[in-house]
Image (cartoon, rainbow, N blue to C red):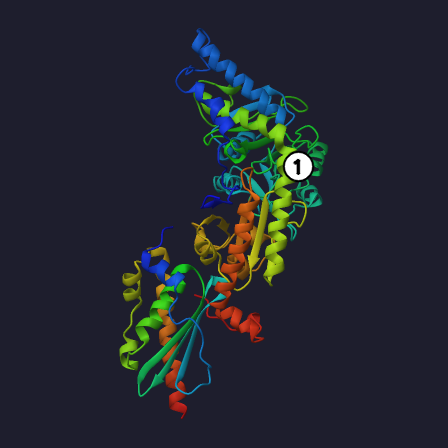
Amino acid sequence: MKLPIFLDNHSTTPMDTRVLEAMLPYFVEKFGNAASRNHAFGWAAEEAVENARKQIAKLIKADAKEIVFTSGATESDNLAIKGVLEMYKEKGNHIITSSTEHRAVLDTAKSLEAKGLATVTYLPVDKYGMVTPEDIRNAITDKTVLISIMLANNEIGTINPVKEIGKIAKEKGILFHCDATQGVGKIPVDVQDMGIDLMSFTSHKIYGPKGVGALYVRKKNPRVRITAQLDGGGHERGMRSGTLPVPLIVGFGKACELCEQEMAADAARLTTMRDRLQAAIMAALEESYLNGHPTNRLPGNLNISFAYVEGESLLMGMKDIALSSGSACTSATLEPSYVLRALGVGTDLAHSSIRFGLGRFNTDEEIDYTIKKVIEVVTKLREMSPLYEMAKEGVDLKSVQWAAH
Amino acid sequence: MAYSDKVVDHFNNPRNMGSFKKDEDGVGTGMVGAPECGDVMKLQIKVQNDTIVDAKFKTFGCGSAIASSSLATEWLKGKTIEEAQKIKNTDIVQELNLPPVKIHCSVLAEDAIKAALADYQKKADVK
């Protein structure tokens, strides 16, 4: 077993070597511009891009013509939301989204709000992090043009009732954008069945290269139109100008093909490993709390708060395991995770949270090591924690007058 | 974020981690911070003849907070009350090479020292 261990597969994933092999010919040998229509170099590139488009579309049960390549999920979210608001501004300017969306959605919505181009409803979520479809129905006004709800949350892995949301959107004639960055390739996604009109996802979360993503844009029932956010050569049917990064797209296509073939086996294996990790940790450590939905969540996701210890110190104690925390000290904003706060998790427990993200290449041996290490470090840090000492003495920490600083 | 070697050393080998009985003679206890803010420090001193003969800490917080309080106990030992009053958070920042976002950890450690000294003084005055 090699250290450090990578257990942060929600942030990114290592590339599958089969993906790299597929990409290699497209750097030097087949370097053409896919938009060059008049020579063999261009044709070879175009053929590769169209093949990848089919592989990607197949994974989400879409038509290849409905795939628009972007630089990643952040751009896809921006293009979907800004593109729809601009295109349908005669119809209305109201967006419905939720408080636990990724920043790429929330900040896009806020930026439109700040410019006076949209009004936004941020729906709360339940204690597991799920959006309630009825809340969406109740939030709809005659000005609503877009519902944007994520498929699965990046911190807690909770999966939203997307199909029901899609139904409501269809019934009301409102477009439904889904940020499926964490879900595609991990759980089955069917844009028809789920009633999704626009969907963002990206390559590097599914063992493909960084720097390429896609926006699914429905072509019929209804035909969705978006205003391009980049002016230029009119690539991607006018929706996203810019020369296509052929090697990245080929890799993205291959990554999707592998997911399509191996998703069921991967998911079963990851769920077993994840459940074992969860059971062993929670049995050994009192006052450890699961964040997110107990069952309805991504196969590789596990988010636990360890009372009385702070997340960043946990990460420091487990420096040979790559993990992430909802602690303020680990965030750029110095605020604890807004996702955990939205579930009603107290600030103290948000500071104490650790996210384990299992992926295709993790092994049972790595999970054994992680179980041992987590128990050891949490125990050690609790010994060091004045809060744990007080709790053991029977002091109710909530009743203490703390001096906030 | 990369930690300085000194922070890592204090984190891995905390000095004087533990507790004295609060009501023990000559013990001063300072507890500062709040769980909601992500750090709470408890710092205790044991004083004999105006000199700090022993010090202990327990900290809930990030690595820099743990290191700051561990260092503080090291520095306190052997100092007189008057000398201990002069420990500044900036000394801790310098010694541990704390980056700007971690300066509040050193401030908290200074506050903890001051609180422990005040508690000792208060108990001594009552007598």
Q: Nearer the viewer, residue B89 or A276?
A: A276
What residue did someone put label 1 on? A142
Measured as percent of width and height from the top left, residue A360 is found at: 56, 37
Residue in the picture at 46% in, 54% down: A318
Asked whether the viewer can see residue A129, the reply is: no
Circle 1: element type: loop
Q: Which residue occupies the extreme bottom position in the image? A: B127
- Considering only vertical position in the picture, is A326 above or below A203? below
- Considering only vertical position in the picture, is A48 above or below B103? above
- Considering only vertical position in the picture, is B49 above or below B99? below
Asked whether the viewer can see residue A398, the reply is: yes
Q: Say left or right for A99 vs A383.
A: right
Q: Nearer the viewer, residue A263 or A35?
A: A263
Q: Say left or right for A312 vs A278.
A: left
Identify the amino acid type marked 1. Asp
Count of numbered marks:
1
Measured as percent of width and height from the top left, residue A361 is found at: 53, 38
Measured as percent of width and height from the top left, residue A50 is found at: 54, 17
Measured as percent of width and height from the top left, residue A30 is found at: 43, 15
Q: Nearer the viewer, residue A41 or A380?
A: A380
- Considering only vertical position in the picture, is A38 above or below A88? above
Q: Say left or right for A38 vs A358.
A: left
Q: Quadrant of the C terminus of chain A?
A: bottom left
Q: Quadrant of residue A395?
A: bottom right
Other residues around mark 1 within 10 Å, as few (<14) / some (14–19) / many (≥20): few
